[in-house]
Amino acid sequence: MDKICGEILSMFKKIISILAGSVFIAIGINYFAIPHHLVDGGIIGLGLIAKYTLGLKPGLTIIVLSLPLYIYAWFHFRSYFYNGLHGLLVTSLLIDYFHPLSSWDTAPILVSAITGGFMIGTGIGIMLLTKTSTGGVDLLALMIAKSTTLNVGIIIFIIDSIVILFGWIIIQETTIIFSSLMVIMIGLTTFTITKYYTE
């Protein structure tokens, strides 16, 4: 009985963390990043680039770009597949659902980069506390780290840097300094939450 109650409580906490984390990420992206054409790293960054250049929905783009990773994970890293799928779907759907926020008046670019990074980092951190994630690059980095001697944090940093540079090259409005500041803020916030509030 205690085991069943424990599993139900764990599942409930995971659901709450996914919903809360996804809301933080969706607000951070739509209210702070999109109005200033800021680019995040990883697959979220690629979703934003698709939004800025082609007018595509970033959340839907994130799901489409993540599909090959999840198909591969299904066959080779099943636990990573389960831990990332729910976070990916809920986060992506809420990013598109909160899209109207991007047309609201927002803070200046420096404040938006810092606050947006804090919001997105908080969302990611909350989800990581229950061993869930938004998938995408996190999933790719975990799979690469499992197969090599590279640190997962270094892999994520390299991929994020490539995406930001790519966005800066093809999108004239993108400011690499403020996008980098936002990504640094995301990393610091995620690190702080996962370091001091880990169960």
Image (tube, rainbow, N blue to C red):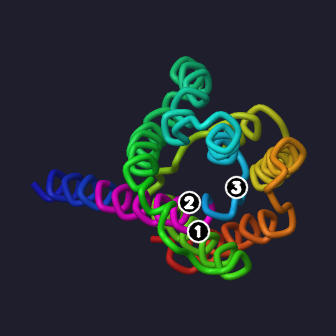
Going by the numbered disc 3, the residue's amino acid type is: Asp
Q: Is residue 158 above or below residue 72?
A: below
Q: Is label 3 in a helix, a strand or a loop?
A: loop
Q: Is residue 140 magenta?
A: no
Residue 106 visible from this viewpoint: yes
Task: Quickly name the residue at label 3.
Answer: 40
Q: Is label 1 in a helix, a strand or a loop?
A: helix
Cβ–Cβ below 8 Å for labels 1 and 2?
Answer: yes
Going by the numbered disc 1, the residue's amino acid type is: Phe
Magenta span: chief secondary structure: helix
Q: Is residue 157 above or below residue 198?
A: above
Q: Is label 2 in a helix, a strand or a loop?
A: helix
Q: Which region shows up in magenta?
A: 15-33
Q: Nearer the viewer, mark 3 or mark 1?
A: 1
Task: Quickly name the residue at label 1.
Answer: 32
Cβ–Cβ below 8 Å for labels 3 and 1?
Answer: no
Going by the numbered disc 2, the residue's amino acid type is: Ile
